């Protein structure tokens, strides 16, 4: 009985596979050493089979060519996923493409990394950590991603937290995103410490990294930062960008905190306006207290804050507030309908209140007026693109971006804008962003 129990313990520690034969009663006639040798032999046979398949797929991944290769890459990743977690020891070495790697090796490492993100990697955590410690820059980046998705969050988190202290600013962003994604109390406490850092550059870099990764797991700690209005005041743009990238984190508590934050910024109307516009996107989760506070802000002496609060209330269905909001813009157009800026300003307000068709109509008129004076206003074309995107018309949105005479730098920024997710997701339309150009 002791020998059999020992054997079962050994078997449990070894990589599992549905192909490994179960122990039979007849095996009781064999010695423990013979049973272990049989098991090792079978495991080695299976491991060799995995090795052949992994090497075959790795070679194919490196050789993939052509622009439309999405389906082929997906099929190759599927073959690796079919092997299951028992193949992970064979996959880990491939996440590091090496120094001065070819495009093929970089592609292979990226694809293998994607596979490992979907498998249990607890058994190979030490090997992934080894890549983080000794690998190339690309290998280290992939190791951070794998550790960030680990089902061994305590050990992975400890290593990532230790790495954060001496890391470069760029690498810190990758690390904090992985730490936030892992969860666990220790990792969340560390995230809170980073977002509460006295160095505003550290905080800003952390928020921007969480935003780029659309890390919803960081929502509770971002909320803590927003509640600390004095500290948050230096990071309005970064906080607004985070909420736009991770709208799923917003609930009644977030909205209430954002209103208080906006109220604390009344001395800086531009910043308060940005926060209020963010609140307007989430009227479906407002509490009655949020509406009451917004109505108070709608009487603010600051034009920016007053109009931003009114826009929020209009989006929540206040028709009387809509008439009051648009009255001044309507009058300006009536006074001089040849001014492109008058049409553009009303278009921007209509966009803010969710009247995208009305915004397109006014933006189009603004475009005509500006073209009559042989002027090109990039913001008008961006407004047309954004309005069409909100209406679920990515092709039209891409068309306006293409016609707008935008700089490559502007296009690269817009490529990261959540409004243009559908444009970016379509390989043909995504060309408008000119992402391969400097």
Image (cartoon, rainbow, N blue to C red):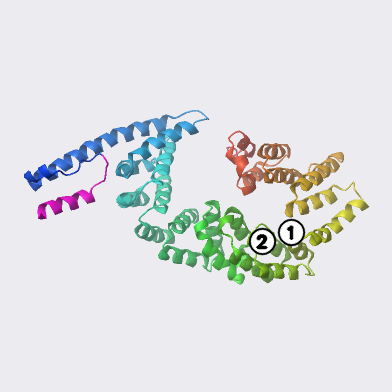
Circle 2 crowding by C-alpha within 10 Å: few under 14, some 14–19, many from 20 = many
Q: Tell me where the magenta segment starts and ends, as one range.
A: 1-18
**Residue 428, disc:** none
Residue under label 2? 279
What SS does tag 2 mark? helix
28 to the left or right of 365:
left
Image quadrant occupied by the C terminus: top right
Marks 1 and 2, how far apart in space? 14 Å
For this rendering, which residue is in front, 306 or 207?
306
Marker count (numbered): 2
Q: Check the image and report above or below for 181 versus 300.
A: above
Image quadrant in which you'd find residue 318? bottom right
Residue lying at 62% horizontally and 65% vertically, measured from the top left? 234
Q: Are marks 1 and 2 in contact (CB under 8 Å)?
A: no
Question: Is residue 14 located in the magenta-colored stretch of the structure?
Answer: yes
Q: Give the image location of residue 218, x and y in percent.
A: 51, 60
Circle 1 crowding by C-alpha within 10 Å: few under 14, some 14–19, many from 20 = few
Residue at the farthest right position: 335
**Residue 317, disc:** 1
Q: Earlier in the sequence, mark 1 or mark 2?
A: 2
Q: Check the image and report above or below for 246 versus 20.
A: below
Q: Give the image location of residue 261, x and y in percent.
A: 64, 68
């Amino acid at each position: 009985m002791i020998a059999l129990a020992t054997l079962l313990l050994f078997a449990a520690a070894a990589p599992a596979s549905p192909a490994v034969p179960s122990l039979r009663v007849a095996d009781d006639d064999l010695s423990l050493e013979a049973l272990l040798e049989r098991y090792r032999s079978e495991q080695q046979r299976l491991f060799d089979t995995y090795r052949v398949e992994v090497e075959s797929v790795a070679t194919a991944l490196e050789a993939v060519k052509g622009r439309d290769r999405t389906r082929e890459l997906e099929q190759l990743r599927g073959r690796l996923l079919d092997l299951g977690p028992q193949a992970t020891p064979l996959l880990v070495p491939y996440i590091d493409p090496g120094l001065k790697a070819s495009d093929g090796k970089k592609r292979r490492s990226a694809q293998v990394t994607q596979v490992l993100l979907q498998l249990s990697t607890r058994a190979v955590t030490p090997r992934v950590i080894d890549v983080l410690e000794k690998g190339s820059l690309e290998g280290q980046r992939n190791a951070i991603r794998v550790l960030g998705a680990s089902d061994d969050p305590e050990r992975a988190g400890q290593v990532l937290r230790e790495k954060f202290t001496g890391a470069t600013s760029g690498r810190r962003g990758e690390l904090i995103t992985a730490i936030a994604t892992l969860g666990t109390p220790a990792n969340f406490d560390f995230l809170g410490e980073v977002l509460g850092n006295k160095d505003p550059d550290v905080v800003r870099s952390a928020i921007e990294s969480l935003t780029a990764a659309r890390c919803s797991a960081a929502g509770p700690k971002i909320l803590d930062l927003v509640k600390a209005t004095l500290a948050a005041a230096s990071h309005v743009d970064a906080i607004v960008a985070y909420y736009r990238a991770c709208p799923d984190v917003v609930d009644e508590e977030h909205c209430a905190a954002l209103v208080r934050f906006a109220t604390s910024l009344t001395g800086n109307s531009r910043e308060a306006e940005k926060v209020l516009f963010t609140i307007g996107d989430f009227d479906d989760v407002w509490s009655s207290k949020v509406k009451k506070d917004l109505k108070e802000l709608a009487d603010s002496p600051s034009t920016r804050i007053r109009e931003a609060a009114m826009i929020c209330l209009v989006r929540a269905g206040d028709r009387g507030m809509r008439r009051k909001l648009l009255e001044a813009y309507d009058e300006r157009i009536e006074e001089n309908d040849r001014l492109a800026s008058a049409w553009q300003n009303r278009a921007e307000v209509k966009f803010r209140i969710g009247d995208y068709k009305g915004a397109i109509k006014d933006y189009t008129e603004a475009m005509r007026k500006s073209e009559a004076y042989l002027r090109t206003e990039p913001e008008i074309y961006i407004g047309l693109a954004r309005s069409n995107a909100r209406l679920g018309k990515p092709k039209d949105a891409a068309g306006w971006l293409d016609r707008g005479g935008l700089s490559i730098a502007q296009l690269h920024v817009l490529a990261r804008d959540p409004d243009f997710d559908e444009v970016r997701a379509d390989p043909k339309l995504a060309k408008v962003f000119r992402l391969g150009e400097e």
